[in-house]
Image: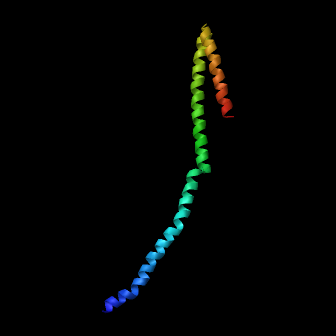
């Protein structure tokens, strides 16, 4: 009988903790959801820096490839290949466009 009486007295205290916890979860849930949405919708400065660096590295790779193609065409041009001379000029224009994009 004493055990049952003790359980009856302790039940509201135990249940109030559960209820308080549930209420706290319900109250903070909208804040967490909105905060997560804002995180997903925005880009942090470090992410922006990483993206910019990645884009610059890719541009440098494209420039390097174009420069190698241009140099090869110029060598052919120097050996008398007129078609290669026109190709070297076209590639140089593409190089200039690529550089203008990142300056």
Q: Which residue is pictured at 54% across the width and 63% down the height?
A: 30
Q: Is residue 50 left or right of residue 22?
A: right
Quadrant including the N terminus: bottom left
Which residue is the extreme one toward the bottom?
Answer: 2
Give the residue displayed 57% in from the left and 34% down from the top.
Answer: 58
Q: How is the image coloured?
A: rainbow
Q: Residue at x 53, y 60 (%)?
A: 33
Outermost residue to the top? 80
Whole-percent x and y of residue 88?
62, 17
Q: Nearer the viewer, residue 45 or 15?
A: 15
Residue furthest left as drawn: 1
Q: Is residue 96 above or below residue 58?
A: above
Coordinates of residue 48 in the picture (x, y in percent): 61, 46
Residue 61's place in the image compared with 36, above or below, is above
Image coords of residue 54 (percent x, y): 57, 39
The image quarter containing residue 39 is: bottom right
Q: Is residue 49 above or below residue 78?
A: below
Number of residue marks? 0
Quarter of the image for the C terminus: give it.
top right
Frontmost residue, 75 versus 32: 32
User: Which residue is at the front of the view, 64 or 1?
Assistant: 1
């Amino acid at each position: 009988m004493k055990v049952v009486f003790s359980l009856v007295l302790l039940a509201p205290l135990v249940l109030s903790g559960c209820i308080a916890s549930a209420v706290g979860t319900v109250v903070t849930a909208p804040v967490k959801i909105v905060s997560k949405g804002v995180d997903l919708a925005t880009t942090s400065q470090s992410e922006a820096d990483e993206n910019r660096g990645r884009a610059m590295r890719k541009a440098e790779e494209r420039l390097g490839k174009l420069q190698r193609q241009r140099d090869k065409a110029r060598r052919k041009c120097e050996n008398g290949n007129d078609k290669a001379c026109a190709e070297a000029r076209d590639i140089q224009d593409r190089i200039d466009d690529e550089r203008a994009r990142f300056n």
